Amino acid sequence: MPNSSSVSEFLLLAFADTRELQLLHFGLFLGIYLAALLGNGLILTAVACHHRLHTPMYFFLLNLALLDLGSISTILPKAMANSLWDTRAISYEGCAAQVFFLVFFVGAEYSLLTVMAYDRYVAICKPLHYRSLLGSRACAKMAAAAWGSGFLNAVLHTANTFSLPLCHGNVLEQFFCEIPHILKLSCSDAYLREGQLLMFSACLTIVFFVFIVFSYVQIFRAVLGMPSEQGRQKTFSMCLPHLAVVSLFVSTIMFTHLKPLSISSLSLDLVVSFLYLVVPPAVNPLIYSMRNRELKDALRKMMHCCVSESRNCPSSSAYD
């Protein structure tokens, strides 16, 4: 990727100027990062080790946990290092890598959330066709399509953004490398190409969102038509965690990129970016395990294995 500017590094936005607050931010980020690693790691292990969870829903949840780990690992380690060592710098190549992986993981996660909405729609509205529509091969293809779309999106955005000459300094008004803030430094009209690409991505995001909303309208219609109260509660327990994750993820992203300039501010941008990039990977495992009895049982049995002696700990197949 050609670098037509003289910028060799960028300066990220510092959270605080005093050393005490910098260390406080480091401790906060470290706690959130460890919580995300632990929660998503437990989900990965539970889904991989327990045969009862080898279903399309949990297969997609495993992919979501991987994407969450990737997205938060793209942002927080650098932010923690900057707070700990009292620096703001990130190299040009490091910034490009951060943009690439961030767009990759976030784009793939949004595509995967759309696939997960389709999975819930078929399971509830077309249960007789579930195995034929969502067999192992179909699930693998849909997951690969989600990851592939994120990769293609990341390549296009990163190549367009970092081929632009930069002549308005190297200070980014964000604690990580974000495309709109990099475009503000461009001195070429070529940034319009990236703007058009961002608009295309925004339109695609809206299309996916409409699909998710349509899927859940059909799901709720089917649920309200169920004669059994127990059946309705079980179905809601399957769908509400995914709906909560989608709502948090989509609402914060849309607010970030569609909010009017009149209410834009540095502090607001920081808070919203924190909400859609840092909070979801940490709370998603809690949301999905809170009302999911199968996942909670698998995690409980796995914890029991960890605290008991290995020679007395039965294999996962014994539980299944």
Image (cartoon, grey):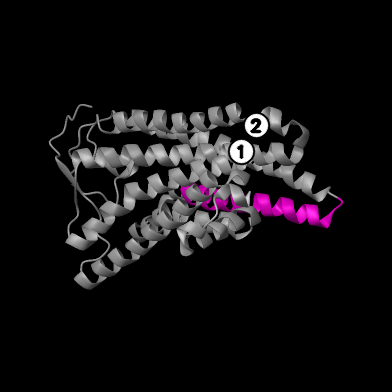
Estimate the x, y position of residue 157 in percent, counting from the top left. Answer: 35, 32
User: Magenta residues?
Assistant: 227-254
Estimate the x, y position of residue 317 in percent, counting from the top left. Answer: 59, 47
The residue shown at (37%, 33%) is 154
The residue shown at (51%, 55%) is 285
Instruction: Write down the residue under mark 1.
Output: 56
Q: Residues within 10 Å of mark 1 (few under 14, many from 20)?
A: many
Q: How many numbered marks, from 0 up? A: 2
The residue shown at (32%, 54%) is 76
Instruction: Write down the residue under mark 2.
Output: 134
Q: Magenta stretch containing residue 216, yes or no? A: no
Q: Is residue 18 something that shows in the picture?
A: no
Q: Do residues under tags 1 and 2 come within 8 Å of each other at their CB atoms?
A: yes
Nearer to me, 191 or 207: 207
Label 1 sits on what residue type? Pro
Quarter of the image that includes the N terminus: top left
